[in-house]
Image (cartoon, rainbow, N blue to C red):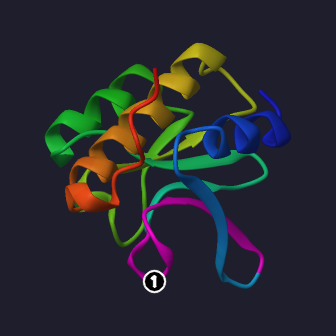
Amino acid sequence: MTPAELRAYCLGKAGAWPDEPWEGDTVAKIGPGERGKIFAFLGEQTLGVKSARTREEADEWLVRYPDDASVMAYIGRSGWNTLRIDRDIPDDEIRDAVDTSYDLVMAGLPKKFWPPASG
């Protein structure tokens, strides 16, 4: 998966929008403006995502992909991991990781900020 494909996948999620909270760092957020929450950190070779509700659950990524998954600095204790997108993690698992992060972060938003259900 290329960085452009990853960005398109993240921003294709309902209600998702790009932001650059720190110069040169692109993220995907959900929710309105200042209340928007990051669900993906988009790097050139990496993706930062909320992998699980707990650190213990998120550690499954570290066991399965010891060379390509790591605990994110600062927020890793809350279940966030950094995944390499240019090596051994299959694209479908990268997409699943984005989906999980999106769902977990959206669940933490007040329902009035959830995007309308499609279908």
Q: Assess whether residue 34 is covered by the magenta stretch.
A: yes
Q: Where the N terminus falls, by quadrant?
A: top right
Q: Nearer the viewer, residue 75 or 106?
A: 106
Q: Position of residue 35 (x, y in %)?
A: 38, 77
Regarding mark 1 in the picture, which secondary structure is present there? helix
Q: Position of residue 108 (x, y in %)?
A: 21, 56
* Residue at x 19% of width, y 34% of height: 57
Q: Nearer the viewer, residue 33 or 54?
A: 33
Side (left or right) of 118 relative to 18: left
Q: Is residue 30 above or below residue 97?
A: below
Three-letter amino acid code at the position of disc 1: Glu
Q: Position of residue 79 (x, y in %)?
A: 26, 50
Q: Which residue is mark 1?
A: 34
* Residue at x 80% of width, y 42% of height: 3
Q: Assess whether residue 58 is covered by the magenta stretch.
A: no
Residue stretch rendered in magenta on the structure: 24-36
* Residue at x 37% of width, y 33% of height: 100
Crowding at dot 1, Cα within 10 Å, few <14 / some 14-19 / many 20+, comes out as: few
Q: Is residue 27 above or below residue 14?
A: below
Q: Nearer the viewer, residue 113 or 73?
A: 113
Q: Is residue 71 above or below residue 27?
A: above
Q: Number of labelled discs?
A: 1
Rendered image quadrant of residue 101: top left
Q: Position of residue 26 (x, y in %)?
A: 69, 66
Q: Is residue 85 above or below residue 22?
A: above
Side (left or right) of 27 relative to 87: left
